[in-house]
Image: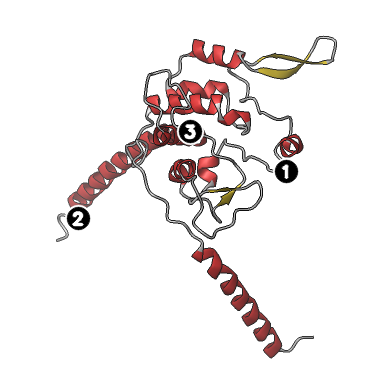
Amino acid sequence: MMRPASVIALLGACVLGFATAAAPARAQEIELPTQSWSFNGPFGTFDRASAQRGFQIYNEVCSNCHSMKLGYYRNLTGIGIPEEDIKAIAATKMVPTIADDGTPAERPALPADHFKSPYANDKAARAALNGALPPDMSVLEKARAGGADYIADLLNGYGDPPPGMKIGDGLYYNKYFPGHQIAMPQPLQPDQIVYADGTKATLEQEAHDVATFLTYMANPEMEQRKRIGVKAVIFLTLLSGLTYAVKRKVWADVH
């Protein structure tokens, strides 16, 4: 049985160990540049045009490696894409189904289907990408500290490493990625995308647009939630005023 003094010493060593381990982590924290987003603030809304351009990037570039398992094609109505266009977009993807005779088959996707994943499973993804597993993008904006800023800054953060910094085999320098070495090669280049609306496809614009789209996919109810919140604040404000007026009326003869 451990003596009390031994227990205290052991707890002290654990605390010291955690503090020591946390120090390098704090030292590696990266200050992300902040950007202006239309959806920030209590009255913010999604920039539909930007989100549609972001979907174009996801569909043409990101979806080759990254899945979006929690997203449905029908979610695209929320960024202003017409239903007929969504049906056409979904129909370009083939998804698994079961034929009438019970054998595995494929069919064109429907708006009610999940976004098609590029690989059958995580093992297939790792096998195709030298062991790396691209993160699912369904709630990537929520899963990363910094949210949309992190996504946009990461896409803008590729470049040459500082002098004297050695980059590991199969890794790439990114000044905004923790540790600054990332397995994903730079996915976007200036003018890589020919936007359907004619917007100039600079790297900064592409990064901003795809971050907007991924924020929408992670928070498709955001605008509705904000509207309800504003209504609730107005209601509570009026109720507070009414309550105060009633209190003054009831207690007027007491004072």
Dot label at residue 255: none
> Residue at 50% of width from left, 65% of height from top?
26
Dot label at residue 251: 2
Above or below, comparing residue 238 to residue 167 in the picture: above
Which image quadrant is residue 7 in? bottom right
Give x and y (percent) for residue 88.
Answer: 55, 11
Q: What is the three-letter code of the residue carrying label 3?
A: Gln
> Residue at 32% of width from left, 37% of height from top?
43
Q: Residues within 10 Å of mark 2 (few under 14, many from 20)?
A: few
* Mark 1 residue element: loop
* Mark 2 residue element: loop
* Mark 3 residue element: loop
- Counting residues from the start of the chain, the first of labels 3 and 1 encountered is 1
Give x and y (percent) for residue 68.
Answer: 60, 32
Q: What is the three-letter code of the residue carrying label 1?
A: Gly
The nearer-to-camera label among 3 and 1 is: 3
Please give the residue where the numbered disc 3 appears in the rendered image: 189
Q: Quadrant of the C terminus?
A: bottom left
Please give the residue where the numbered disc 1 appears in the rendered image: 131
Q: Is residue 133 left or right of residue 197?
A: right
The nearer-to-camera label among 2 and 3 is: 3
Q: Is residue 228 left or right of residue 166?
A: left
